[in-house]
Image (cartoon, rainbow, N blue to C red):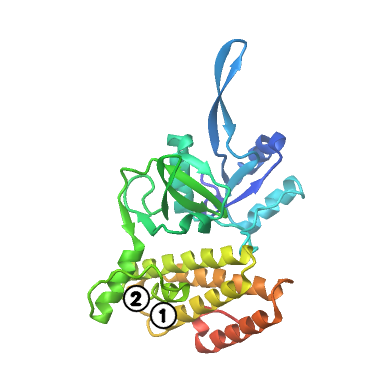
Amino acid sequence: MPLAEQQVSTWCYLFVHHARVDWVNERLKDRFHTFIHKSVVYKQVKGRVKKEERPTISGLLFVQGGEKAIRQALHDIDPVLYLMNDCSTRKTAVIPDRVMQAFIRVSRMDAGRIRFMSHPLDYYSAGHPLIRITSGVLNGFEGYIVRISRDKCLVTSVGDMIVAIKGVHKEQFENIGTYVRQRRAEQQGVELMEEGASESWKHELERSFFRPENQLDVMAITDGLYRWIAEASGWMRNGNFPDAAEAVCLLLEKTGVCFSSVYTDSRLGNLKEVWKACREADGILRVLETHAEVSAEVKRHIAACRQSLSVSYPFLSVKA
């Protein structure tokens, strides 16, 4: 019989001591869907080769359900257990169900296709266009096509973890950047032109926006939001606080301009992903405002930015 917790579509994850993973998993399975990514290893035992399944990442356990319910369940099992946070927002790392289901399907078909990477997403995004897969088991996945160990891989994020999924040769891709440029050109009444490689990141960010007229437009703009949130998060991790703050402020301002006259238009569909991205972006500003290493000047800039946004674009829910 379906469990109440299974109605919640998002996933979280935690790390458990390798000796206790099965014990914790069995107790969580009474109330939630759980998943452990496993890889096949071969070991020699008494002269014979034995096939064995082991967790790919020691102690990694995925759980589907509401954050509060999972936290309470973990506390009941053992108070030292806790959900992992997204390092950029410092909030619980959440994985949409559509992403997790594709991840699980690929894992069950061939766990070896998935490789957990040690670098952040911005390390792989440089020089590679953002694409969306439009066919196959990974349909709907977004990321960057990167050649790793001679294999064409989709590098994407699952929660706050970066994975490379190999064997994407037969899938069809949609270049999101090309779609955005095409829509901008249509609205400006000019021919589609290739953008110069030497333009600054500010100009590149501004070119992520155009006037949305349908749900596909909203999806393309949302992809741009998450791309620049990842970029700003990388700058913040690397100590480039001024650019991180300026990028997020510009991102939120352009979003406000973009949706100010159309956010109630029913043709655009549900904008919850746009507002969610804005909350994540604002979360970066909140972290920077309290970060001990961020200069007073940058903090003043952030305060002025958030004040301006709250007055000019209250629908973004950015409060000063």
Crowd band around label 1 with a 10 angstrom C-alpha radius: few (<14), some (14–19), many (20+): many
Is 79 placed left or right of 288 in the picture?
right
Front one among 104 and 47:
47
- Report helix, strand or loop for mark 2: loop
* Residue 55, quarter of picture: top right
Q: Looking at the image, can residue 320 be seen?
A: no
Residue 189 in view, yes or no: yes
Question: Pointer 2 and pointer 1: residues touching (CB < 8 Å)?
Answer: yes
Going by the image, does 206 lie left or right of 317?
left
Of the 4 image quadrants, the one containing the C terminus is: bottom right
Question: Does 267 appear above or below 86?
Answer: below
Q: Amino acid at mark 1?
A: Phe
**Residue closest to the eye, 255 or 297:** 297
Q: Position of residue 250 (x, y in %)?
A: 50, 79
Between marks 2 and 1, how big is the CA–CA gap? Answer: 8 Å
In the image, residue 313 sits, relative to residue 48, either above or below, namely below
Residue at the image position 48 percent from the left and 46 percent from the top: 164
